[in-house]
Image (spheres, helix red, strand yellow):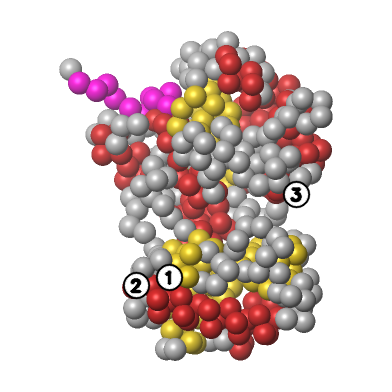
Amino acid sequence: MVTQEFIKKLVVKNDNKIVLLVMDGVGGLPNEFEKTEIESAYTPNLDEVVKHAITGIADPVSMGITPGSGPGHLGIFGYDPVKWEIGRGVLSALGIGFPIKKKDVAARGNFATLDKDGKIVDRRAGRIPTELCKKLTEMIQNEIKEIDGVKIFIRPVMDYRFVVILRGEGLSDKIADTDPQVTGVKPLPAKALSKEAEKTAEILNKFIEKAHEIIKDQHPANGLLLRGFAEYPDIPTMEEVYGLHPAAIATYPMYKGLAKLVGMDILDVPGMEITDELKVLKENYDKYDFFYFHVKKTDSYGEDGNFEAKVHLIEEVDKTIVPEILKLKPTVFAITGDHSTPAKMKQHSFHGVPFVLYSENARPDRAEYFSEREIGTKGGLGRFEAKNEIILMLAHAMKLKKFGA
């Protein structure tokens, strides 16, 4: 990929519109019938789009690398996810509108279920509802406001997720996750990855010990796991680099945080359904030239191992969202995922994801339907790193001028 500084010199501003539909974790693996979730879904509208589009398989970071949602999205937005390694703590804090400051350290948290020996039974505490998450965070916040002169903030995010922010002097985000990412073992202690982080690790371990004591009887959420420690990064915006006036349409706080980090306006969605998101897109279509439209539950169903639910959601997107976006006639309509979450694996995976770019300015390839294997074997873009997607979107929207004489 050419650098952002290079692209910056070629950017041309115009009113042409780009709609980017991101189905989170959409990629999958074959089931007993040798079909992935995408291949099992009835998607006549997506298939029709593919027939008139240029397609390929995108690696969110690089071949063989399993990405988190942060790196996966940053690549799609045109930022090298290796260069811009950003912890989920900051993204979660931004996503809920917490006034995070430059020297704060933030971590994303999961409420979890621990057994009598303190071992993890469920890393997500049965996906407790947001209302219970609010109750638990309030219980902890009422008892823990400061540790060793460092202020502690704990706020609910959504479902079992929360965010912890530390504010004080001498803090560092060079802390290893306390979430071992598996069950049957105890949560890990907060471990300093540098000498400068030893104070922060000590404070975090005191916080974890106190918090566990406060919620020890709150089954199923009687434990907590922390990961994605981060400070606020100095990152250029999409407008500064790509000349875009971008907006984000998402329901989950972390994805709002990602979008806000790169300078998108966050549009308020008055519900949790994809139809609510569609309504917001239509209402704001004349105000922006780039729309990030996020669908979350393809990922959630994959993590739950719910193959059929993931299939049905892909079908719902095909039936409800795709035709309505096409009616808006954007200059570029791009469809992809930030990573794969195969129901078979119940977690993010290293497998590439389909990328489809529909535009009157596109040169269609030989792919005829929406499928990992179809696009992987017939897609004109072949296999490429996702950080190149934004350049293709800009080019097809005629937002890049000629390079050289």
Labelled disc at residue 192? 1
Between disc 1 and disc 3, the foreground one is: 1
Quadrant location of residue 172? Answer: bottom left
> SS class of the residue under badge 1?
strand
Q: Which residues are magenta?
A: 392-404
Determine whether 10 is above or below 234 in the image.
Answer: above
Q: Compare marks 2 and 3 and give the one earlier in the sequence.
A: 2
> SS class of the residue under badge 3?
loop
Residue that sits furthest to the top in the current view: 366
Callout 1–callout 3 Cβ contact below 8 Å: no
Determine whether 301 is above or below 225 in the image.
Answer: above
Which residue does the numbered mark 3 point to in the structure image? Answer: 304
Tell me how far mark 1 sits from mark 3, CA to CA: 32 Å
Q: Is residue 399 highlighted in magenta? A: yes
Residue that sits furthest to the left in the current view: 405
Tell me how far mark 1 sits from mark 2, CA to CA: 7 Å
Q: Position of residue 208 (x, y in %)?
A: 58, 78
Labelled disc at residue 195? 2
Identify which residue is drawn at 33% across, 57% down. Answer: 234
